[in-house]
Image (cartoon, grey):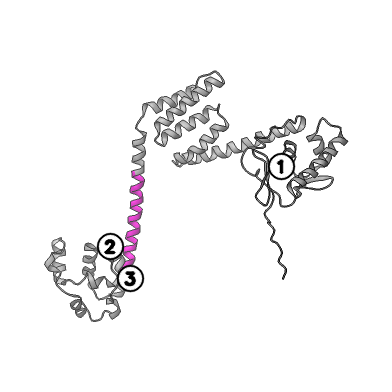
Amino acid sequence: MRHELSRDTRPMQLLLSTVAQVLRPDGVAVPLGPRDAALLAWLVLEGPTPRAQLAALLWPESPPEAARNTLRQRLFQLRKLLGADVVSGQQNLQLAAGVGHDLAGGHELLADVNLDLGGDYAAWLAQQRAQRVDAHLSMRQAEAEQLERAGEFEAALPHAQALLRLAPLSEAAHRRVMRLHYLAGDRAAALLAFDACEQVLKNEVGTRPSTETLGLLRAIEARPRIARDREVRRQRADVQAAAANTAFARERFNEAMNAYNQAVTEVPTHVLAWCFRMRPGVLLQGGPALARKEAAVSTDAVEGSAAAGLGLAGGAVTNTLEALRAAHPSVPEEAWAPTQIAHD
């Protein structure tokens, strides 16, 4: 019996954001040369392109025929290096079917590739990088603003810090980091963020922070108790959560009462009221069998205690389960069946 060897069907993956590599289906990362990386990045972002145009972009210093020959040799060497085609086509070249890449998101493009290309390719690369950075900045800024409006200051901080890394000379980015640290309750970090802003502006452009940035600094210095205010907000949120839980518990209790009343229709309601007052946790979990353990009490004693506005005295719990069952013969027998009762 013949067995075919299984083949790895994972696609070839181009890694072109930073260090240019191709991740083969077997998991091996193969480094790419600068021109190979430039070729593949163009095809990823621009799609099918005439062979002659690519040759002129990648070898602008060579005559057209020589550039086309060099391109043909590079494609042959690339296939030999990777063991499969990542580029297909004759007159128009494009990525081979099923080849993946990492340029769908993020903002970097050949960031760690030392390209010595000039002319049209250099202009195209600069434009692509600028567009990707702008799109990334807009996305980060929208995320930071949305989270800040929602009061999620700590969650907004990573977005603000990413914005600052991309635009280290932007005072608006520095102010956002200062403000979010302060609103998150970390006044010391907010002051350190101002120091970093002041140092960068001094070292890079020889200026001091603007009036708006200094105004934010004074506001932070004048109010050192933001941490306490944040704790008050947290406590308020806890109270709101507790209120929600109380409403849920009340709903559960009402459901339990309804189910219990349907099963034990002949037990006086004041007995049930006593059960809930004395052991509410049992009623929520015990169901009809509550009467077996908690409701064996004297009706008169319950009524007397309720009228007096007091809890039951120890001597009032006198009747047994049998007495309660005898007093209410119409209650179905299964309603008194033993059930696991939760204890306080």
How far apart are the alpha carbons under marks 2 and 1? 64 Å
For disc 2, the neighbor class at 10 Å (few under 14, some 14 to 19, many from 20) is some
Which residue has dot 1 on it?
45
| Count of numbered marks | 3
Residue 240 is inside the magenta segment: yes
**Quadrant of the image occupied by residue 140:** top right
Element type where label 2 sits in the image = helix
Residue depicted at x 69% and y 32%: 114
Q: In what quadrant of the picture does the C terminus appear?
A: bottom left
Element type where label 1 sits in the image = helix
Residue 110 is inside the magenta segment: no
Q: Is residue 336 above or below residue 67?
A: below
Which residue has dot 2 on it?
281
Residue type for callout 2: Gly
Mark nearer the N terminus (3 vs 2): 3
Q: Which is more foreground, mark 2 or mark 1?
A: 1
Q: Position of residue 122 (x, y in %)?
A: 73, 31
Q: Which residues are magenta?
A: 235-257
Q: Is residue 168 above or below residue 254?
A: above
| Rendered image: mark on residue 259 | 3
**Quadrant of the image occupied by residue 166:** top right
Task: Give the side of residue 313 with respect to residue 281, left or right.
Answer: left
Q: Main secondary structure of the magenta part?
A: helix
Q: Position of residue 300 (x, y in %)?
A: 14, 71
